[in-house]
Each structure stands twice: as structure tokens, then as C-alpha cells.
Amino acid sequence: MKIQVINPNTTASMTQKIGLAAKAVASPDTEIIACNPTMGPVSIEGHYDEALSVVGLLEEIHQGEATGVDGYVIACFGDPGLLAARELARGPVLGIAEAAMHAASFVATGFSIVTTLKRTQVIARQLVENYGMSRFCRNIRAIDLPVLELEIAGSPARKTIIQECKSALAEDDCGAIVLGCGGMADLPAEISDEIGIPVIDGVTAAVKFVEALVSLGLSTSKVGDLAYPIPKPYTGMLAPFAPKK
Amino acid sequence: MKIQVINPNTTASMTQKIGLAAKAVASPDTEIIACNPTMGPVSIEGHYDEALSVVGLLEEIHQGEATGVDGYVIACFGDPGLLAARELARGPVLGIAEAAMHAASFVATGFSIVTTLKRTQVIARQLVENYGMSRFCRNIRAIDLPVLELEIAGSPARKTIIQECKSALAEDDCGAIVLGCGGMADLPAEISDEIGIPVIDGVTAAVKFVEALVSLGLSTSKVGDLAYPIPKPYTGMLAPFAPKK
Amino acid sequence: MKIQVINPNTTASMTQKIGLAAKAVASPDTEIIACNPTMGPVSIEGHYDEALSVVGLLEEIHQGEATGVDGYVIACFGDPGLLAARELARGPVLGIAEAAMHAASFVATGFSIVTTLKRTQVIARQLVENYGMSRFCRNIRAIDLPVLELEIAGSPARKTIIQECKSALAEDDCGAIVLGCGGMADLPAEISDEIGIPVIDGVTAAVKFVEALVSLGLSTSKVGDLAYPIPKPYTGMLAPFAPKK
Amino acid sequence: MKIQVINPNTTASMTQKIGLAAKAVASPDTEIIACNPTMGPVSIEGHYDEALSVVGLLEEIHQGEATGVDGYVIACFGDPGLLAARELARGPVLGIAEAAMHAASFVATGFSIVTTLKRTQVIARQLVENYGMSRFCRNIRAIDLPVLELEIAGSPARKTIIQECKSALAEDDCGAIVLGCGGMADLPAEISDEIGIPVIDGVTAAVKFVEALVSLGLSTSKVGDLAYPIPKPYTGMLAPFAPKK
Amino acid sequence: MKIQVINPNTTASMTQKIGLAAKAVASPDTEIIACNPTMGPVSIEGHYDEALSVVGLLEEIHQGEATGVDGYVIACFGDPGLLAARELARGPVLGIAEAAMHAASFVATGFSIVTTLKRTQVIARQLVENYGMSRFCRNIRAIDLPVLELEIAGSPARKTIIQECKSALAEDDCGAIVLGCGGMADLPAEISDEIGIPVIDGVTAAVKFVEALVSLGLSTSKVGDLAYPIPKPYTGMLAPFAPKK
Amino acid sequence: MKIQVINPNTTASMTQKIGLAAKAVASPDTEIIACNPTMGPVSIEGHYDEALSVVGLLEEIHQGEATGVDGYVIACFGDPGLLAARELARGPVLGIAEAAMHAASFVATGFSIVTTLKRTQVIARQLVENYGMSRFCRNIRAIDLPVLELEIAGSPARKTIIQECKSALAEDDCGAIVLGCGGMADLPAEISDEIGIPVIDGVTAAVKFVEALVSLGLSTSKVGDLAYPIPKPYTGMLAPFAPKK
């Protein structure tokens, strides 16, 4: 089975980290294709970054479809372009926020999210509502450090994240932690050991859930709003994106 | 006051119709700048079209900011890129779905939406929830004709819309109709005359609400998630979109 | 266009302040008629005051209808008698809580309300739910001073309000402030300058939204529950209020 | 124990019917005082009627307090003035819609409401939400006959109600019926016999729940928004309503 | 009228306390049968205890039905087995959490719950949602002492409860307290005297509400999901529980 | 990895069918242990059956824990005893309703449930709410045939189910079907082929999700309400169920 794990930003070091985390949990017969778009923001830290990251993300999905990919993971905690990607893909597509929150609801009756920037808390909040997770989500916390801090060796980010997870455990009445950034994919085991409750990274959760769906023979519904895009012309720079018959 | 009304698809005839509707209701001292992107889908009929329309839409907002625009209207009923546009803009930005639903809630305790394609009903449904309009929205109806049918002289679309509005009035216990497509901006008066309840087009509603906000001195909050995008590099084809300091 | 701005309490100084605020933002061709009932509470600070203020308010609407008023503003943050007033009126009727919250949701993804008495917080809370604003409202704060304090020259109320707005900005993760009392209609510009985010007063917001609706040709739906009251006898002191054919 | 059952409209025949129903279920040591205001609408069929009925209703509560009443029932299905009445009263105050819905949720997992006019369905809908009954209420049905039809001997209203209850049972997946008008207080036993599920009238339910609360020593909370109205002047015709210290 | 008050745990001293509280408020013509199962947990402090308490509880209901009981109270704040019990019973069945929350919503616009263990807060939270009480419930507090502490003479539990109620009053903006354990049935009067707002114990509230329903002739709906269990074999140790025709 | 798939009713033929379905999708290195309790109802068709099925279910979990089981599936669509089972288990526990609904939300924006008896629709409805799936669930349909009909060779049940799925596709605006009974575990492929949208059986979905969670190293949170049951005595027939230290 081929699973394409798309880091929607263009920072290769993050893509590599995400790819390693994905491969570490994938089944032996799963091929993980970790990639990032050739265009777009180097990090996604707001609605604008997110909206523009979707172009490159969809290009990756187009390529994935052309090369027989069986399922996709969108490896940014805002789950950018999730429904657009599902229109394009035959197989299942999961966002890492989606996967992580669902996984958390399977092992605890309440979870807290620990994300990077304060300004992206609103995005997480909307996802919580979109996925019906309001009754499980106890709090959304931010360490208020830029996403790319997580890529810097020796950055205090890791320590700050652990500290915030401890605060969540002490104050939020939560039974699990959801890590709110693709760049935290290397942290769950370490933090879980430290604080003693399940700590969930969406990259790995999404890989396993996509594997599960593909094994079950479940692909994206092609009846209704997730049917393939209606063929039509696109103009200008986006002409290559026009849906074909 | 300069208000830029952006039709996010690239069909000029629809932009013209939308511009006419906007100008017809604008205050004498309001300059309406109707435009559409130079790139992207000729019509927006799903999540994928919508996601890609945002690139061109944001380019228009960039230009608007450079030329002193006071407020913006996003003239597609899916309100594509609304929060991303708000990050970019100093002045207020309204989507036409947003404006129409809010206006409807001011003149009736329940409204029904009449949109084009069945497959976009899900998008409308999500907007209803995002805007907190669930308790006002009685039904979302679709005539199941492509968006560009509304651009064809002699098309039966107009008749079908009126018929659907009549069904809404008869069956949905609604006191107002929200027209669910920017391409219906020329219809509200005619339909309202025919069925006897308020019929609301979002283009005109949004223009007046943006005028109202600008008159009140209200612009988009620049504290929190709608602050200007964080400066950073963008790569590839999207490099020109990189937020500057 | 004639807009009647009704302060539902009987304190003339507050009516005057509200009228000045309304006139300051009204379009040149809008005539603002600021008034208050001839009977009822001098301030509205609870469910009981609110319920009884509605009688005089409806009397004002009756008079407005008799004199060709095009739209109404109910200038008390509890929006007393809103649906009853809509039954009576041909044109649109807006409450100031309603207008302020909707305006806030147009310029920020979250707002906090700063009101006067703690005991009226419950009323604001119910309005938040009635208008579908739960996902936008971050907090409802009270300075716990009587409404009429705002009418006393040299009162510390103004300072306390600004302090509370600063606390909201610091603690509530909000991008805008909604002022929760008609008697604060003179404050938004000053506070906004001080704290740097949009501060919204409902009186001015409602005036502009009513202007917008009237310009759009939208009046209150007369099909369904907002149809004119059914003609019938009223007895006793309220006989003059009986709906006529 | 003295329980005052207030029919908020001024139609004495309905008051009498309501009083009989109340007395039929009251405990031997309960004195039922059935009354109606001396002023206001002869029937309550919309927001406007409802708003104005509250004046007379509150006058009755004032009198009740002066004469040592232990608890109150507001016998109109819109529960007009409920929170205002609670401010005024020491003892508990229940609305009949409130009592009936709560009782229904005790004996079935879903109920349908059968009310009189279509235009009052919106009022019932709002009460369902206010009382948190959305997950129990399956449907709100109207026979679309005026309230006072129920007072006319030989009217077909009774038959129409039974027919509507049968439709509810057949189509709504409900286990109980809530009768949506004080004027139906004489019907529950007859309909229940006919359709075989619990049929609940709010007048009798409210009387028993008020008895229960009084027996438990529970009165209206006087801390917070239901504290006695703040003493202040009222002007004009409403001066007698001014809250005293 | 015979009302069976079932303490679902097997601690006789708690049953006795509950029985005394029930008898103290019951009408003269009500016979209170206080009992507990012959099998199961000595206290209910989690989902597991709760699930297993239901067996003995249902055995008690079987016996109640055989001996002409008119209504039932389930005297544990988790309301274990409520819908199962309703299937089995002809008359009404109320849980004490259900009764207490409904009573609280009749006398205040907001209440806080004070329960025993922190780990059972989740159970209370789910009940709040199941009963539609989210808009009334301000907070769920725990003293974090085991249930059976309440049975120990001289235990500090009572003092801790009062302290927690005071904190609720000071911090939660609540107008009433709901006591969150059957073992607190002897406390409401004392605490209410101390803190000056209604304090509601579910045992006594449920007894009075069951009396009310029985007086109204209302029994559990036998159409739909609360119809008597479908006759079928049960195997093994549970064979005696098999529903008979 | 050892996964125990527990059919909570005592009908061996259904257990066998469920076991076969589970094995058909399990990974090569997963051992499926399909079992059913030694006591309890032969089918689960209501709240009462469900409540009593939990005893035997928990006995199976006790045994699973003693024999090193890594994760559990509760193979009845009511997910009986889910949280109690989670308290008892170290590894993850999933209900089949839970797994199926979550899987459906991954491949479609809306799903309909097709279950057996009308009287169990309420149970499904509550699960939809408990899992936050209200915005995804379009309808809950019942074929109104007993659960054990699915075990009878030549029964028309299979045909009726397919017919109901077709109706769902035609009328419910759904993109996927969730099969609402463990006894339908052999049907999804056949129905999906026939109707052309994803058809999801919870048994297989739950097996794959449990595999996923175990692979991720995620087990049930032992902090908070899902911690192991507090050691205490149980009396009578249930004494063996007492939680040990």
C-alpha cells in the first residue's frame, strides 16, 4: 500500500522529520512517500499561510493520483485543504488534527491540545467544532513559539512543550494530550513517558488510520460533495489545475 | 469610500452582473470596484474549485490594499478565503453568504437558502454552522443547475429558482429567502415581488454592511488571528505571495 | 429615510446621548428620531424592568408606524420586546445587542462583552445564544455599576469600563469588544484608541445596519410569526394597545 | 399551601377551565387561586400579545406576594414573563410549557408538541431551546385554529387536536404528547385514552411541580439575576409598578 | 401511593439515610420503600461500579413491579440504569441527578454541582448534556473524597462540602447548588441556611416529582424504546432476568 | 497482537460471523479472539437487554486482561459498557458504533445509519450525540426486524437492509452508510457493490482502529475517570466482580 504524507509547508527538514515518524509506525507492506509542495509558505501560521499552502498540496495530490497512491495524510495541524483533497483523491485522505483528535477520543474522555502559536488557536478551535470534538476537547494551549523553532537544534521549544503538557495535565482535567503541529511528530513517546498519559501526534495516528481504511476497502465517497471535481477551464497561472474529465 | 467587490471565479459576465447589483445599492459616495481574479476556475462548484479560487482572490486583495480600498466583498456564496482575506486587509471583509444570512436573521425568525448545485449544499451547511445561523436556517435547497447556467440568456434557471423559492415558502416555515449564489444578484426584487417575503442577495447585503462598518470606523481586528500575516518566505510559483513586513 | 431610535428607559439624558451618537453616524439623508417612552423604568437592570419597558417601547413603535418611520433601533442592550416590535413594524427593527454582536463577528473571530451590572449578564448570555453568537463570544464581563452611573458627570464608570476592556483584551483571547449598554454609546472611539482593537457600540451599529436594510428594500417579513398582530380586543388599561385591522 | 394559577389572557372562561383542571390535581391542603389580569389581550397569539400580557401578569404576582402566595403557575404555553415573575416572587414560579416539557422528558425519550396557531410555533421552538429540550422534542405541530376556538362549545377544535396527536404518534417517533395551550387543560385524559401514550397538559404538571418545590422548601434564588427588582422610579402609567425597597 | 427509593449501592447505612430523607418530604399518603440491591458494589465511584450496580437495581425494580409499586427513584447521582429501569416499570422512574438538575433550573438560571470524587465529574458532565442542562450548569465541582466518607461519623466531608458550596457561590455565578451524591441527602437544609441560596438534593426532589407524576396519572410511555423489554431467553447466571411475556 | 472481539449477546452463530469478519481484515500478526459472554441476553434490543449484557461483557474483559489481550472490540451497535470496559482494560477498547461512525466521517461528509429495530434508534441517536457525530449523521433508519432474523438462513432481512440503504442514498443526502448491528458484519462489501458508496461495518472498522492504536503504543488513559476501578467489596452474586488492588 502506498501512503503519501504531505507536509503542506515547504520546509524540507520538517518533511523529513514527518516522514521518519510516519515510517516508524507504518506496516511493513506500506510504502510511505513523504513530500512537500514545490511552492508556498515555509511554515503555516495563520489563515493566509494555510489558504496558500493548499495550492501546492493539491498539486501533490494530483501527482499522487497519477502514481497510484492509495491514501493521503495532510501533515499540518490546520488540516488545510482537506475536503478539496478528498474531492481529488480516490483513496482516503486524513488530516493530522482530525486523526489525532479522533484517536484521543478513543483512549480518554477528555483531551487538551498543545499547539505552537497563539494566533492559530482559533484554527484548532474551528477544527474541534467541525469534527464534533467539542465535548472531548478540554483546552487548546499554545506555547507561542513559531513553527520553525521546532526545527532548530537546541531550541527551548521542546522543553516549553513538555511544560505546557504538564500544565494541561494539572489544570485541564484531561486524560490525553494532542500535539498541535506536524513538527512535533518526534515528541509523543518522550512526553508520554514524562507525564504518564497518552500523548498523540497526528502524523502517526493518521498514517495508521489511513492504513486501516485502505485495508477495509474504504475509499472516499464519490457520491455527493466529495465526487471528483467537475471538469471545467481554469485560467491564468492556475490553468494546469483545471479538473479533467 | 472604495469597496472592492471580488467575484472569485474568472467569468467576466458574472463579475459584470455582480458589479451592477453592487453599484445599484451603493451610497453616492461609494466607489464600487468590481473585479475577478486573473487566474482560477470559471465557476466555483465544490471544495476543490473553492480552494483554488482563493489564490486569485488574495491577489486581488493585495492589489486592493495597495490602492487604498476601504472594504471588500467576496462575491461567492461559499465565502472562500474569508479569514485569509481578513488577515490581509486593513478594512472589513464580508462574504456574501455571511452578509445574506445575517440580513435574513434581522427581518425574519427563519430563512431558507436556495442555491445552485446539490453538491455545494454541504458548503452552505458548514457556513450556516460557522456563522451560528443554525437556529435561523430552515432548509438549504438546490435547483441542481450549474452556476454558469445563470449566465445564459433564455436559460430556464431563473424560472426554476422562483419555483424552488415558492416550495420553500410553502414547505419550510420560513419568513425569508437567501439566494445562494453570486450569480443570482439580479434576482431578489423580482422574486420577492412574486412570493411576497424578503428575498436576500448577499452581494448587495454585503456592500451595504461593509459601507456600514467603514462608516462606523470599524476595521478588521489586528490583534489575534486576523493580524497581518507573519512575514516569511514563500517558494516557487507562490513566492510573490510572501507576506512582507 | 426616518429611523426612530428608542431608548426603552425613561431617562432623557440617556436618550439624548444615544440620539447624538446615532446622528453622528447617520447618512446625510437619514433623519434620526431619538425618543423614550412616556412610561416605565428609569433604567433597565433586570428581567422585571425589561418586561415592563416593553409597553412604552411598543407605544413608540405604534407612533412611529403612524408617522412613516422606515426603521427602528431598540437602544437597550437586552433588546427588550424585539420580536413584538417586529410584528408591529413594517420596516426593519434592530436591537443594539444584536447589531453589536453581528458587527463584532464581521471584524473579529472572537469578542468579549463589557456590560454594567452583574445581574444582567444572564440576559446577555441568553441573547448570545438566541443570536447564534456562542462561538464568537469569549466572555461577558460586568463592571457592576448601575446603569445610571453612566449619566453622572465625573463618575468613575468610564474609567472602570476601560479597565475592564483592558482585562478582556489581556485574558479573553478576544479581538473586539462589544459595549453592553446603550448608555456607553459615547465611548467606543475613546476606548478603541486606548486598547487598539475594534470597540463596538450597538446604537451606532444598529443605525447603520437599519440604514443598510432599508436601502436594500428589506423590511420585516410579514409571513409567519412576524406578521402584524392579529386584531382582537385588549382590556383595561391596555385597551388602547389592541391590534386593529 | 396557596398556589396562584395565572391565565395571562383576559378571557374568564379559559381561566375557569384552567382553574378547574388545577383544582382537580391539587393536593387536599393546596388552595388554588385561579385568576387572570384585569388588562391585556383576550388571547395570546404572537410576540406582541405575549409582551403586553406580561403587565397584567406581573400585577397579579404583585398581589400574590401581598397575600402570601407560596408559588405561581403562568398558564400560557409561551411562558410569558417567566423570569420577570421570578424576580418578583419569593416562592417558585413555573410556566406551563416548562412544566409540560420537563414532565414529558421524565416519561418518554421523545415528545411532540401540539399547539394552536402556526405563528406561535416559533415561540414554542425558542422555549424548547431555552429549556434545553431540543434533544427530547421531536416536532412542534399546529392545528392552526385560534386560541379562543377552544372556548366555543361544539367547535371542531377538539377533534382536530386529537387528529394531530394521532399524526404525531404515527410520524414523529415520539413517546408522549405535550399539549401546547393553556386552553387544552381539559383534554389530556381523553386524548391519552384515545392514543395510548402519555399526554401532558402543562397547567396540571406545573401545579404539581410547584407543590413539589414548595414542599421541598425550595423558593426562587434571590442571589443573582432573580433577586428582587432593584428599587427605582417608574414613570407615567406604569408608576405603580415601580419596585419598592 | 407506593414509591420505591433504590440506593443502587449495597451500603445499608446510606440506604437508611436516603430513606429518612425521602420519608421526611413524602406526602402523608405516600409509602416510601427504601431499599438497596442484594448484590453489587458498596459504593459507586466510576463507570465500572455504575455498570455493575445496574443488575441489582433492575432486580429491585422487578420486585417493585411484582408488588404494585407506583413509581421509583434511583438514588445515585449517576442515575445508573435509568432507561433500562423505565423499560421495566409501568410507573415513572426518576434519577436523582435528573430530578435535582430539573428542580434547580426551576428556581435559578444557573446552578453548580458539588459531587464527591473528581473521577465521577465526567459522569455528571454527561448527564448534564443528556438532560439538556448545559445552559444551566455553571460548574461541576468535586471535594475528592470517597463516597463512603459521608457515612463516617465525624468525617470532615460535611465541612469540605460546605466549603466547596461557598466557593461555587463566590466563583461560579450560580444561583443554586445541586448536591451530587445520594449520600448528601441529609445536608441541603443545613447548607442552604449557611450560604443563602437554594441547595438541592436529588433524593427528595425525585420523590416529590414522582409523586407529582403519579398524581397526574402519568406513567412511563410504553410506545417506543421504553416499551416493556422484548421477551427472550437470557443465559447463565442472568437467566432469571429474562423478560417474560 | 491479541485483539478480543466480544459479541455482548450470547448467540454463538452471531459471534462466529463477527469473528470471521474480524479475521478477514486483521493483520497477519494479529490474533483475533472472538467470544461472547456465558450469561445474558441472546440478543440486545433495548436499554434493558443492553444494561444486562454488560455483566458478561465485563467478565470477558477481566479474562482478557488476565490473558494479555492488547485491545478490545465491543461488537454490538449500542456500544454497551464502553466506558466501564475502558476502566478495566489497559489497552484500547472500541465500540463498533463508535468505530463505524468515525470511519464514515473520514470518507464522507454525511452518513446514514441503517439499524434493525425501530426501538433501538434512540440508542443510536444518543451515541451519535455522545461521539459528536451530529453534524455527520443524516438519518437513522430501521428495517424493524429482530436482530436474530439476521442469523436465519433465507431470511428476507438482507434484502430489506439493501432496500433501506438504497432509500438512504436516494433521500438522505448521505455519502456513506453505517450498518447498525454487529450481525451485519458480513454485508458491507455486497451492499457497497450494489449501491456504489462506502458501506461501513463497525466490527471490521473497530478491529483495524484497535490495531492502529496498539501499533501507535496508545492505551487507555489511566489518569482520570478511566483509571482502574477503585478496589472495594462487591456483595452477593457480583462479589467476584469486585475490583482488586
Image (cartoon, coloured by chain):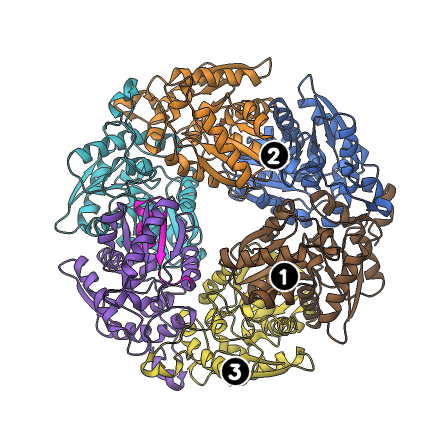
Chain colours: A cyan, B orange, C blue, D brown, E yellow, F purple
Question: Are both tags, 3 and 2, on one chain?
Answer: no
Q: Position of residue F157 (x, y in %)?
A: 30, 61
> Which residue corresponds to mark 3?
E64
Instruction: Chain letter for mark 3, please.
Output: E
Instruction: Chain letter for mark 1, please.
Output: D
Task: Residue A207: say if magenta.
Answer: no
- Circle 2 packing at 10 Å, graded few (<14), some (14-19), many (20+), is many
Looking at the rendering, which quadrant does residue C3 occupy? top right
What whole-number distance in Å separates the C-alpha atoms at marks 3 and 1? 27 Å
> Which residue corresponds to mark 2?
B106
Q: Nearer the viewer, mark 1 or mark 2?
A: 1
Q: Position of residue A22 (x, y in %)?
A: 21, 46
Asked whether F199 or A100 is in front, the reply is F199
| Vertical placement of residue A71 versus B27, above or below | below
Asked whether E108 or F37 is in front, the reply is F37
Residue type at the position of mark 2: Phe
Which quadrant is the N terminus of chain E positioned in?
bottom right
- The numbered mark at residue F231 is none
Asked whether E218 or A88 is in front, the reply is E218
Q: Is there a contact, CB below 8 Å, between mark 3 and mark 2?
A: no
**Total numbered circles:** 3
Q: Magenta residues? A: F99-118
Q: Residue at x 34, y 34 (%)?
A: A44
Q: Position of residue A122 (x, y in %)?
A: 44, 40
Q: Secondary structure at mark 1?
A: helix
- Circle 1 packing at 10 Å, graded few (<14), some (14-19), many (20+), is many
> Which residue corresponds to mark 1?
D100
Residue type at the position of mark 3: Gly
Q: Nearer the viewer, mark 3 or mark 2?
A: 3
